[in-house]
Image (spheres, rainbow, N blue to C red):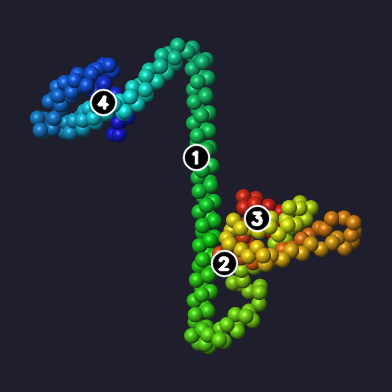
Amino acid sequence: MADNEDINPYELLEIEPIATEAEIKKAYRQKSLKVHPDRHPNNPQAAQKFHELNTAYELLLDPTRRTALDTKLNAQQAKKLRFAAYDNKRKAMMEELEKSEREFKKSRVDAQREVQRRQQEEEMIKEEGRRLMREKQKAMSKLAEEKGKQKAKEEDAEAPSTGPLDTTVRLKFSPVNHAELAKLENIAALLRRFGPLDAASIVLSIKPNKKNPSKPPKHATALVPFSKVDGAFAAVMGSGRKDHGLEGIE
């Protein structure tokens, strides 16, 4: 029952679990006369008792809900009978098992909360990227108003590629530890989680080991152009983080 799940509808109506629908209705009529608020205006608990009685009545007349209730009560009764037969040692074992189950459920809830926290954190990073994009668009509009559309285009073209609003991310990693990143499509797949990017324009540079050319290269660098600033910003913020798939990657 919604208000008090500990109340047994059968006990409240003083009927047996095998009672027929007619017996349920008869018991309800008899009990409702005793607790109806209109008949007992001076009883402050009459309204609550009448509500509980109605809730029990409606539940027992619903075949689906009554079946679910019977299943629950039978399981509770079976559990009580089994538990009553246990000695003190077995009771302690059961209590410990239930405690472990509660702790497991709690740990699962905590894990879900951690996932939500990370999702919120990632959303905050993306929102910061969107804020930077809005600032960029506002700055470009102001520049266009002051100096004209043509001059704004020229200044945009002359802006250094490493400016604060640039969408290209430089990736630095060890070819030995991340051999799969020697392929451009794998680099694109790794970073696409942060936002859309131009996979065809990725530039990869793997320089040979200068001191010992026979050994594998120590470092590799890739330039990855994102389509939007928020994607580039999110990738930078995820640098080196295992939970973002960038462990050992700068």
Between label 1 and label 4, give the one nearer the viewer.
4
Can residue 170 be seen in this snapshot? no
Between label 3 and label 1, give the one nearer the viewer.
3
Q: Earlier in the sequence, mark 2 or mark 1?
A: 1
Q: Earlier in the sequence, mark 1 or mark 4?
A: 4
Give 142 or 214, whichever is nearer the viewer.
214
Amino acid beneath label 3? Leu
Q: Name the residue under label 4.
A: 60
State whether residue 162 is above or below residue 185: below
Q: Quadrant of the C terminus?
A: bottom right
Q: Earlier in the sequence, mark 3 or mark 4?
A: 4
The disc at residue 109 is 1
Q: Which of marks 2 and 3 is nearer the N terminus?
A: 3
Can residue 1 be seen in this snapshot? yes
* Residue density around tag 4, few if under 14, some if 14–19, many if 20 or more, within 10 Å: many
* Among the 4 quarters of the image, the one containing residue 34: top left
